[in-house]
Image (tube, rainbow, N blue to C red):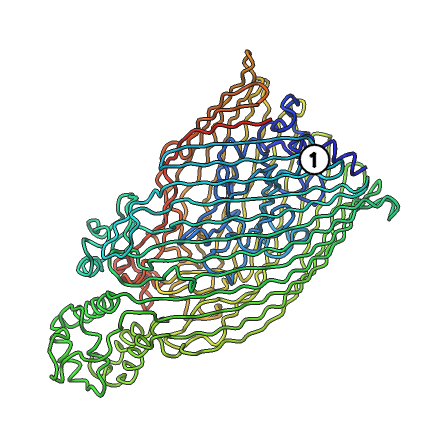
């Protein structure tokens, strides 16, 4: 039976589940005359690990077919958000820092120790980080976005949802596809695939693609030595080969091997608010060094000019192989199917970085192999599933072994010491005007055997007194060079058993019960070193003079000086510091769902689900004051989710209306926050996300015209908490805006609307157009919720016009992404070593933030501009 079915369906691979949530299904690549779907019955999903009609699944699912993904220009998961309300995908300093969020919940991806809240699954293989699932997805059959915890069937780290990607399988009908694209910003792309039989029981598919594009950011290189004057370019290629073997009528085996490589410059941040530190950057740079401040240090106009004196090259390699076997066993338990999915994946990333994004040479990382991380894992999943007249049952086993290697290398530039001196002397000048603002005072604090009067005298001259005067600033002064070389190795072993069963209590009422037990075992080993010792020697010298510093500027001000001299990359307590930690944790997750079908066209359902996101380690230098934290561990995150929904199929099954109320309560929500100098991970006691998801699909009476829309209303708020509720109370000042506030990346309203028209017009011609739009109300793009990181409401539009032969042998498309050239930011953040937002004491508003005292410069990674071009497709 399996051989017969697959021989039939692979002749038109797009038929099985190929209908978009919102559009008619694509004609198969092998049979262009196949009728297009025109009813809701054609929308097939595998959200419960078996093929079902969308309207029979008691889960919020957006299913997008090959045709709609192509019409909307979807090449990767970031493009996917224009078709999915409630989904936000962003990236920051590199494409390795890609983060997906659903209903306002997700995990910032800058730290490889953090696993994702939104799981990425490609052809049944789980990708443990969003960045590992980011890239050219090749030929797609469909994508399913599952909202809410999906831990029962898709495993841990799916506490917010799952993006389930299904690619085209090999076909036993010979076929060939080719595609050429040109566009603005010098875009060029070519891809092609070939498929067909190798024998009566063996078929293959081979896909290859290459994409090039110049950057859409203009770069002022300032002091150099960066040679590139643009950034955010594209240069990547993908090869994917597949075999489908049908040895007998009950067995199928699918083997997939793929390789992707990226060699690009990405990504730079640009100033959206330049603070009072601007004169210091200007003084140290060739040219202004950054965007000049607006009057009153307000927000700056939108600009795609950024500043970086160091290169931002990124090199990403992703490869893997998977084997999926399905064996029908008619005699076992009245008929069942055994599924085995085995995978191996290896992902490597190396990056260069301008840490400060100015023209001054303050701090940077080189693309020399000493900064980046790699993830390799082995996974094995077994599922046994079957059904009787009243019961659909499934049991399974999942194991994985994962290794993460992270290397961190950090360099201080020639302007680092003067920049820090400018800031410290400016703070002292505000209290004692006799102390001038100067780039040369660091040596005043670090001269061996200095006294309080000598420090005062040195500060009064701005460190300009020449030696051998006892007032000369002859101490160590944060020399340029490599200050950090750290290596981390994390091993993760995970084991899970699960079951998911749907029982038909009556012909109208179904109950689904799922359970999963997951056991995680993680270990961490690391070595932190300070290669040159120069910067950490400055800190050590300052600590040796602690009493003299306190006597010179006051005991209350001494920690300000020492804290800046002893930041993580200049702290001697990290030199040759070894790390060894190990932790295990087990968690029971699951779901209970009840669905009642009033009529064949109307279903009401209610569900409860518990999700689990594994504990982990913060693979970074983390300190409280100047003392390195003893442990890098952060605890597991869990969520309890409740949903009540209705699914309606109307107008002779051509109109779909679905709506769901959800209430999700996260405990120990893992928040990764950049504090302007380093990333910290803190577990927020509670995050509540509640709201409504609504979707509409209409195959209109007009031939070839369909409409799809969706809207998500979300109220996502942190619970009230104090410093005592955090694992590290010292992090509370930078998180003091969170208690009781709306979470970041959680717009109250998010809506999509798509129009698709495609039909024959005679003379062997076909024409069509599509328009896809996404609206998001305002939201904050910073984990710390600082006001300058707010993004106003905006709308993006993608459009396409197509003409081609009626049999789709050739097609010419003219397309545009971000049609209105909407200007928006992805993520805003505190610029490195350029002011401070939070104060050291509680302010009148009860937090540690006072807008009148905010001296922080804010940078942001921008959304893509309008791009347009033409694509020619040919197939047979």
**Residue at 40% across, 62% down:** 368
Q: Residue most toward the top?
A: 763
**Residue at 45% across, 48% down:** 90
Is residue 17 toward the left or the right of residue 89 in the image?
Answer: right
The answer to whether residue 597 of the structure is visible from this angle is yes
Which quadrant: the C terminus? top right
Q: Residue most toward the front?
A: 198
Is residue 114 toward the left or the right of residue 49 in the image?
Answer: left
Closer to the camera in the image, 846 or 724: 724
Which quadrant: the N terminus? top right
Is residue 837 toward the left or the right of residue 461 in the image?
Answer: right
Name the quadrant containing residue 546: bottom left
The residue wearing badge 1 is 197
Name the quadrant containing residue 435: bottom left
Closer to the camera in the image, 720 or 853: 853
Closer to the camera in the image, 280 or 391: 280
Q: x, y percentage for residue 825?
A: 37, 46
**Residue at 76% across, 35% down:** 200
Closer to the camera in the image, 407 or 21: 407
Q: Residue most toward the bottom?
A: 449
Q: x, y percentage for residue 141?
A: 61, 36
């Amino acid at each position: 039976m399996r051989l017969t079915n697959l021989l039939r369906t692979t002749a038109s691979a797009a038929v099985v589940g190929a209908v978009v949530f919102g559009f008619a299904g694509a004609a198969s690549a092998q049979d262009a005359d196949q009728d297009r779907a025109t009813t809701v019955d054609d929308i097939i999903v595998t959200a419960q690990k078996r093929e079902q009609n969308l309207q029979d699944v008691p889960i919020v699912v957006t299913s997008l077919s090959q045709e709609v993904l192509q019409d909307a220009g979807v090449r990767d998961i970031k493009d996917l958000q224009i078709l999915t309300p409630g989904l936000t995908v962003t990236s920051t300093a590199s494409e390795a820092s890609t983060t997906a969020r659903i209903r306002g919940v997700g995990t910032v991806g800058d730290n490889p120790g953090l696993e994702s809240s939104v799981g990425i699954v490609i052809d049944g293989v789980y990708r443990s980080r969003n960045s590992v699932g980011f890239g050219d997805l090749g030929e797609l059959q469909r994508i399913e976005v599952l909202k809410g915890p999906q831990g029962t069937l898709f495993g841990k780290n799916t506490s917010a949802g799952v993006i389930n990607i299904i690619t085209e399988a090999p076909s036993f009908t010979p076929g060939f596809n080719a595609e050429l694209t040109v566009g603005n910003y010098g875009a060029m792309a070519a891809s092609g695939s070939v498929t067909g039989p190798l024998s009566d029981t063996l078929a293959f598919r081979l896909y290859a693609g290459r994409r090039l594009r110049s950057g859409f950011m203009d770069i002022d290189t300032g002091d150099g030595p960066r040679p590139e004057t643009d950034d955010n370019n594209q240069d990547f290629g993908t090869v994917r080969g597949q075999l489908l073997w049908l040895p007998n009528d009950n067995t199928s085996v699918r083997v997939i091997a793929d390789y992707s490589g990226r060699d690009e410059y990405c990504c730079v941040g640009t100033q959206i608010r330049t603070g009072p530190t601007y004169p210091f950057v200007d003084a140290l740079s060739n040219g202004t060094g950054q965007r000049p401040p607006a009057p009153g240090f307000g927000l700056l106009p939108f600009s795609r000019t950024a500043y970086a004196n160091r290169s931002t090259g990124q090199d990403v390699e992703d490869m893997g192989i998977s084997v999926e076997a399905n064996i029908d066993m008619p005699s076992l338990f009245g008929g069942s199917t055994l599924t085995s999915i085995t995978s191996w994946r290896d992902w490597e990333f190396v990056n260069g970085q301008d840490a400060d994004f100015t023209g001054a040479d303050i701090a940077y990382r080189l693309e020399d192999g000493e900064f980046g991380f790699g993830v390799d894992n082995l996974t094995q999943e077994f599922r046994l599933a079957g059904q009787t007249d009243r019961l659909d049952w499934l049991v399974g086993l999942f194991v994985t072994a994962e290794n993460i290697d992270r290397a961190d290398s950090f360099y201080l530039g020639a302007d680092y010491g003067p920049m820090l001196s400018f800031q410290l002397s400016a703070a002292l000048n505000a209290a004692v005007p006799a102390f001038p603002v100067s780039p040369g005072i660091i040596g005043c604090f670090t001269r061996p055997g200095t006294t309080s009067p000598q420090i005062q005298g040195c500060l009064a001259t701005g460190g300009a007194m020449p030696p051998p005067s006892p007032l000369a600033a002859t101490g160590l002064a944060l020399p340029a060079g490599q200050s950090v070389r750290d290596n981390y190795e994390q091993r993760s072993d995970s084991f899970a058993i699960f079951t998911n069963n749907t029982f038909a209590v009556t012909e109208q009422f179904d109950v689904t019960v799922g359970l999963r037990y997951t056991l995680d075992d993680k270990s961490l080993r690391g070595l932190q070193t300070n290669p040159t010792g120069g910067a950490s020697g400055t800190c050590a010298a300052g600590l040796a003079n602690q009493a003299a510093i306190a006597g010179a500027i006051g005991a209350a001000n001494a920690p300000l000086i020492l804290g800046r001299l002893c930041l993580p990359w200049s702290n001697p307590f990290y030199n040759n510091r070894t790390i060894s930690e190990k932790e295990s944790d087990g968690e029971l997750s699951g779901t209970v769902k009840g669905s009642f079908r009033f009529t064949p066209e109307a279903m009401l359902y209610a569900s409860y689900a518990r999700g689990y996101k594994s504990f982990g380690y913060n693979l970074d230098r983390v300190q409280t004051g100047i003392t390195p934290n003893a442990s890098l561990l952060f605890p597991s995150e869990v969520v309890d989710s409740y949903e009540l929904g209705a699914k309606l199929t109307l107008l002779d099954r051509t109109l779909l209306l679905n709506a769901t109320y959800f209430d999700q309560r996260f405990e120990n929500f893992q928040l990764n926050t950049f504090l302007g100098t380093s990333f910290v991970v803190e577990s927020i006691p509670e995050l509540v996300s509640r709201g409504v998801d609504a979707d509409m699909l209409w195959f209109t009476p007009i031939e070839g015209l369909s409409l799809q829309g969706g809207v998500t209303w979300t109220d996502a708020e942190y619970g009230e908490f104090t410093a005592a509720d955090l694992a590290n109370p010292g992090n509370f000042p930078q998180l003091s805006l969170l208690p009781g506030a709306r979470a970041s990346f959680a717009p109250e309203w998010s809506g999509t609307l798509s129009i698709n028209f495609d039909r024959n017009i005679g003379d062997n011609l076909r024409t069509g157009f599509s328009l896809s739009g996404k609206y998001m109300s305002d939201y904050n793009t910073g984990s710390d919720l600082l006001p300058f990181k707010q993004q106003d409401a905006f709308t993006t539009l993608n459009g396409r016009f197509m003409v081609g032969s009626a049999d789709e042998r050739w097609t010419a498309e003219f397309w545009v992404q971000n049609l209105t050239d909407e200007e928006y930011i992805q993520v805003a953040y505190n610029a490195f070593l350029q002011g401070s937002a939070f104060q050291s004491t509680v302010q009148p508003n009860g937090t540690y933030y006072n807008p009148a005292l905010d001296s922080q410069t804010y940078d942001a990674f921008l959304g893509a501009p309008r791009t347009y071009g033409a694509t020619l497709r040919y197939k047979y």
